[in-house]
Amino acid sequence: MTESTTFCPVPIEQQPINEYQELAQSWFFSWVKLPKWQFARKLTWVASASLFVCAPISAASFPPEETFLTFFICSLLGASLFVGFILIRLYLGWKYIADRLKKTKIVYEESSWYDGQVWEKPLEFYRRDQLIFQYQVQPLLQKLKKSLISLLIIMVIGILIVWLIS
């Protein structure tokens, strides 16, 4: 590598590779990197905790002693909304990094919001970022998409069951 291609004017914390590493090591966003069952367990904990909020709300609308199945499914649907919000937040965070890795030009700020600059990645930086995107980030985005679709299917089935029994 020559000196002209290795110089990067982008501040270290705004470089896509460093943003990726920071996100991958963060407590919340690293959930997606867990094996499938451990990731599902984290989402199950979120759903279980959100049941403490959703169950009383469902009980106010559907008394458990009269319509237990409707109460139960509505509580689960409410809890699944929280899981959906978590999945969407995870997806948006990883999608931001994916977009930064895929682009040939990086928009960055040197000191504050009003001095935005654009830097074109040298070919070796671009290729490195493409490999990280393709082999590290894209599988995570696919995992999140599948999780969101699965959750949506489960929610639609729950809604249909409630509609059919009402």
Image (cartoon, grey):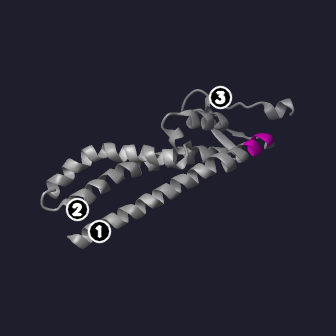
Residue that carries the numbered disc 1 in the rendered image: 161
Q: CA distance from mark 1 to mark 2?
A: 9 Å
Q: Is residue 6 left or right of residue 89?
A: right
- Seen from this angle, which residue lies furthest right? 2
User: Residue at 72% across / 46% down in the picture?
Assistant: 131
Rendered image: mark on residue 69: 2
Residue nearest the observer in this picture, 127 or 143: 143
Residue 107 at what x, y percent from top left?
Answer: 63, 40
Name the amino acid, label 2: Leu
Instruction: Check the image and report above or below for 150 versus 122.
Output: below
Residue 117 covered by magenta stretch: no
State the image quarter where residue 67 is shown.
Answer: bottom left
Residue 118 at what x, y percent from top left?
Answer: 67, 39
Labels 2, 3: front one: 2
Residue that carries the numbered disc 3 in the rendered image: 12
Mark 1 burial class by Cα count in 10 Å: few <14, some 14-19, many 20+: some
Q: CA distance from mark 2 to mark 3?
A: 54 Å
Q: Earlier in the sequence, mark 2 or mark 3?
A: 3
Instruction: Check the image and report above or below for 143 versus 125.
Output: below
Mark 2 burial class by Cα count in 10 Å: few <14, some 14-19, many 20+: some
Labels 1, 2: front one: 2
User: Residue at 60% across / 36% down in the picture?
Assistant: 19
Q: Which residues are magenta?
A: 124-128
| Element on which disc 2 rests | helix
User: Residue at 20% across / 70% down in the picture?
Assistant: 166
Name the amino acid, label 1: Ile
- Quadrant for the N terminus in the image: top right
Residue 126 covered by magenta stretch: yes
